[in-house]
Structure formats: C-alpha cells, structure tokens
Image (spheres, coloured by chain):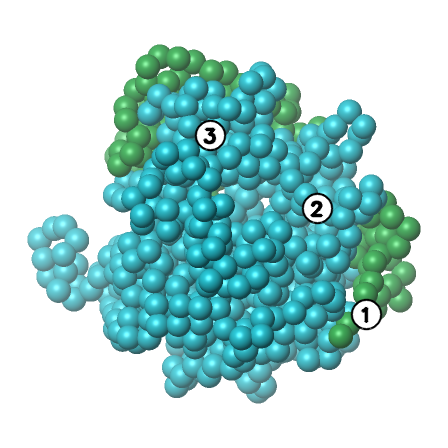
Amino acid sequence: MPTFTDMTRCDGCGECVDICPSDIMHIDPVYRRSYNIEPNFCWECYSCVKACPHHAIDVRGYADFAPLGHKVRVLREPEKGAVSWKIRYRDGRVKEFVFPMRTTPWGSIKAAQDYPPPDPSALNSQLLSHEPEALHIPALPTIQGA
Amino acid sequence: MARQTRFVDSDILIVGGGMAGCGAAYESRYWGRDLRIVLVEKANVERSGAVAQGLSAINCYMGMRWNENQPEDFVRYTRGDLMGLVREDLVYDIARHVDSTVHKFEEWGLPILKNPNGRYMREGKWQIMIHGESYKPLVAEAARKSVTEHYNRIMVTHLLMDAKRPNRIAGAIGFNVRNGDFYVFRAKAVIVSAGGASHIYRARAIGEGMGRTWYAPWSSASAYGLVIPTGAVMTQMENRIVLTRFKDGYGPVGAWFLLLKSHATNAAGENYEKTRYPEIKERVGRYVDIVPMPTCLRNHAMLEEIKAGKGPIYMHTQHVLDTKEKEELGWEDFLDMTIGQAVVWASQNIDPKERPSELITSEPYVMGSHATCSGAWASGPEDCAPSEYQWGYNRMTTVEGLFGAGDTIGGSAHKFSAGSFTEGRIAGKAAVRFVLDRKGESPEIDDDHVASLRQAVYKPLETYRVYRNEFVAGTVSPSFITPLQGLQRLEKLMDEYVGGFSMFYVTNENLLNRGLELLAMLQEDFERIGAEDLHQLQRAWELQHRILTSEAVARHTLYRKETRWPGYYYRGDYPKLDDKEWHCFTGSQYDAKTRQWRMSKLPVHRIVPGFEPLET
C-alpha cells in the first residue's frame, strides 16, 4: 500500500524524506511538499507515516490487490511508549488497538564505552560483552569440535 | 556538477546498519575503546534493514537460564530444517551467545511478552513474542552512541583491496545519495553487514504492488554483491528460500501456527501434509521424518496440492481467535511487522475471527539469516570449529580483514534478528582482535584504481545526460535502459530460467545455461544503464549487486546436481536428494578480472553427533 501525501497538511519539513528506508519520499520541486516517487518500491513500512509531525501521510492499498475504501491509521507516541492503530474496513467495520513499544526513556541506552573497559586478556576468550553475566547462566557453553 | 571526494579513515568500517551492523558497532566499541569505528548505511540507521518496520517476535532465543533449550538442540534443529547442511560451528556459536543479546535488548527497553511465571512468552520452541514496533530505533540508539561516526544515505558500491596484497581488504567506496559526494573509506578491517536479496526473482505482486515483497525491497543483495568481487569464497548460494505466507500481504504465519495453534488445509479441509507424506518420503527418504518437518518440505506439500487443483490453501484463523487477548495478539503480529497484511484484510473485508485466509508460496529470496544459509564462507569460533573451518579470526571470510555478519555469512541458518545482531557482535570483537594484532599495519589504496572506479560509479548519470537528448520524452531509449528496466529483465529471466514461482520453482541444466547467457548480456547492458538522478544512481548500483548475486545463484544451482530442498527449488534433471554425492556445501570463487567462477565442494563436519546422511 503505497504512501501519498495530503496537499493541505504537508509543510515540506522533510522528516519523511529523512527516514524512508527506500529513499522514495522526496520533496516535489514545484509544490514544496513530499510525495512518493516510486510507489512500486514502497514496502508499506509506515516509517514516514509515523515520522510525519503533521499526520499528512496516509496509505492506500496496492492497486493490484487491495480494493478501495479501507484505512489503516497509526499514531506513534514515543514519549508515551505506545503506538495506536485504527483500522477501517471497506464495509465500514472498525477495529482499534494500542500496543506498547518501549519500556525505558528514549536516549537512556548506555553506549558500549560507558561500561568499564574489559580485561585485555578477555579479548582472546570466546566471551562477548557483558558475558557470562548477561547470559544468566554461570558460564558460556562450549563444545569439542570434530 | 562539482562532486567532492571525501576520505574517511577508520580502523573498522561497518557496511550496513541493520541488525548485524548495529551488533558489530556496539561490540567493536566495547573491546576496541581507542579504535576509530565507522558505520555506513544507505538509508537512515534509525529505520533501516530488514527490521526497519519492526518485528512481532524474536525467532532465535535459547532460554538457557530456564533450561528451555541448549545450543546443541538448536544445532539439531537448524541442520534438520536445512536437510543436513549447516555449519554447525557457526550455528552453535550464535546459539550460545544469543541469550545475552536478547537480555540486553530487554534492558535497553524492548517490551517482551511474559507468562505469569515471569518467563518470556514462547511463540514456539525457539521464538518469543515482543512488542517490536520500535525494535530497530532502539537497537540503532545503542549503535549510534557506540561508533566514532556514522554516515547515513551513503550507497557503498565496491569494496577496495590493498594495492600490494591482492587478498587483503583495504576499505570501500560509495556515494552520498543526497549530494552526490564520492566517499573513499580506508579501513584496516571491514565488516559487511549489508542486506540479502529481494527482487532478484519476479515478484507475485505486479505494478504498483511490486514493492510488496516478503523481504524488504531495499534488501538489495549488497551482502553478496559487495563481497563476491573480492574473490571471497561463497557458499550455498543455490539455497534460496521460498516462504509460505498469507497471500498478497505476506503477513507472518509463525504465531498463527505455533502460538495460536491454527492449522492449514486445502480447500476441501484436508490435511495435505499428511496425505502427501508417502510421496515426499519417496523423494527425500527419512528426511521427511525430521521433527519439525523441514520448511522446504512443507512448502513442497503445499505446492503439490496447488498443482493438483486443490487450492486455495487456507489458514483457519477463525477457529483460534476466541478471546480478546488472542485477537489482539493476532493483529499485533501484523501491525508490528507487516502492516500491509492488515490492509489486505481491511480492504477485502476479511475478519480473521470469521473466515479463513489464503496462504501462498512467495517468490524466492537469497539470504543468510532465515531458514536458509547463502553467503560467504567464514572462519569459525576458535574453541569449537573443526580445523578445516578455521583460519584465524571468527567470521572472517577467506579475504584477509574482510568480516561478515547477518545475511553476509553462509552456512548458518535461523539467525533472524537477534542472531544477526549476535553475529555482528562476534564479528565486531574478532575484527578488534585482527586490528590490534596488526598494530602499525595500514592498508594501501591504489589511487588509479579508485579514480577508475569513481568514473564507473557515476557513469550511469553521464549516460542518461548524453542519450536523453535522442528522444522526445518517456522511457524508451535505443541507447540505454533504466535501472527499473534492468531489474525487470533480471527478475523475468531468474523467474523463467533459474526456478521462480511461475515455473513452480523448477529448473534444469539447459534452462540454467540459457539463463546464464541472458545474465551475461544483462551484465554487459549494465554498462549502458542510464540514471536520471542520484536516487536512480542508487537503484543502478543496487541492480549491479543483484545481478552478481543472481549469477552466483545460477552457478551454484547448476553445480549441485540434486534436489536437496524440494519446495525451495527443483532440479528437474536431478529430482532426488543425493547424499552420496552432495552431502556437502557448494563453494564458489569469482575472479573479477576474468569473470570466471571456480566451483568446489566444501566439507560438512559435525560437532553435535546424531545425524547420518542417507546411504543412497
């Protein structure tokens, strides 16, 4: 279901251009608003829909197999750690869902260099960072090769 | 247009910022505190790679802390699923580390569903359920913070070899998709963690829907297209995967089969896997009795059923969504990772609570991370890899200093997201060791070679600029083809000659040889690709990576004279599994100068006992 951009809501900020994994959301040089330049390379991943601060991007199911009249809308609220969905069927039925997406504050992850440096001799061991503690078993398993 | 050339020096260069690349970024910094670590990505690390959209499950988790599974169990499972052929050392290595990866994800903030007893909720024996909408942004946060620099929107087109030592990696080149600048990355070690291949076979969806492939359309085979020209040994490139999924939307079926206990039947309601058992046994002997039945064989049963006119094949979702919790679980399974399936249901008025949904087999894909194991032949872990699988550094290819992870590394199936991140960690640590062992050693770049590559990289823009003036408007040129036209030619020929869905995945020696002829012409025509802007230039180089990968697939398919994985593909001229000749890995080595491929058989060693080939 390729994306399309609402003419009145888009202000050309480029958030969708910045995030699109397929590099298909571009700014139209005449209208100064975004549009999907290659619907046939759209994976309907909704990255742009979720990133748009003006809710200006929507999707319409791929023409080759999705009949018209449906809507799958999303509201992603990172600060609440939740993503909400509203699905409207072609025949008018509606389903709504809310799912969690993160349990910690954004930006709270410790970088690898924020931990004390490992003992240099461990570089030649099979242990990876935070092991064996992070495995929650006493020792890293090993096996004799053939 | 004045394009700058920018030089970026690093100790470790990571190409591709998906799950594997993020794992490599984190781990290489953990062990290499003073090293310059650079991550380069063609999109935006925040939402890139196969997990860009999110995931609803982690498919590789042992649960060793609860004694749920041991790494040996996982080796038994993957080798059974791949009909005996996996690198057990690599599989074991991922299995023993993957739990620490998943525990770290949870600590970082990934919501994992739990049972009342506090254990992770299992979808199946190896899978756990997650609320994974933000899986990739979360992992990207850890990676971005750990590297020295990361570059978004740079399409890496080629790896660079050392000027003096032909089998030593020295870096990579690429271009900025936004401003066209040329980048020369000089590095002591390179980890390729780029994506596997969608869109090398014609997709079932057409026109606007062409992007609705099962694997992401941006998985453009760079995992192989970058590595093959270095002359690194590749393995199991014939082992493409075909997925049984919900029709058109390609929504996942795992949670429906395993967790919700739904089942599939033909249109008459019959269990076709059971009725087709004798026929499959005739083909593959006791491999049919492996539990669970190998993925390819389940595909095979379904394909035979469809060919016999007994479709559509249905997943009976309507029998299992009897509570609100189960309904939410079923929908989240799609909304977290395959939103398009929700659109298919909404648009076609299918409520899974009320009626079954059609299943179908997808077009083939080439990957190293799912129920398949194409990729580079890599050195294994020092403590448990047999000597023939070891040449110094874990996950190093046969090219010195060139490491891989995720889709790039062959022989090691069922990594999925957490296993790919884990393999990135393994490669990251090994690359640090490699660099520290060679203190003071700096690879040399051949400036003339880089200059000629620079010209080649931008040539499609020049071709378009010149020949665009020959005709009034439109896309029909007598002098060039567009990247999309080239891609469609590739998909059609792979489909028709190398076992795509329209041929029911069947090929043979004659078809393959003809396919290789047409591929060679497409490779020649790549010299005449016309790109009207930088975005199309990205598409052009993605196509180049796909063409090279496709040739590897065709060569390996031609070499293996048996049908090892019915349901993934069939050699019509060798319809049976032949353990006597082919209980081995296939290997290839490409010479970029002569364009010749050298094929070989590579040995299968067991480190977990209990699997005997058939005595055919």
The residue under the point 52% across, 52% down is: B295
The chain displayed green equals A
**Local crowd size for mark 2, using a 10 Å CA cut-off: few (<14), some (14–19), many (≥20):** many
The residue under the point 32% across, 18% down is: A90
Q: Amino acid at mark 1?
A: Gln
The residue under the point 56% across, 69% down is: B376
Residue matched to label 3: B316
Residue matched to label 1: A144
Chain letter of the residue beneath label 2 in the structure image: B
Chain letter of the residue beneath label 1 in the structure image: A
Mark in front: 2 vs 1: 1
Chain letter of the residue beneath label 3 in the structure image: B
Q: Nearer the viewer, residue B519 or B288?
A: B288
Q: Amino acid at mark 2?
A: Tyr
Residue B315's image quarter?
top left
Mark pair 3, 1: CA separation:
45 Å
Q: Is residue B392 left or right of residue B55?
A: right
The residue under the point 16% across, 66% down is: B479
Are discs 3 and 2 located on one and the same chain?
A: yes
> Residue B574: percent from the left, percent from the top?
39, 72
The chain displayed cyan equals B
Are discs 2 and 1 located on one and the same chain?
A: no
Mark pair 3, 2: CA separation:
28 Å
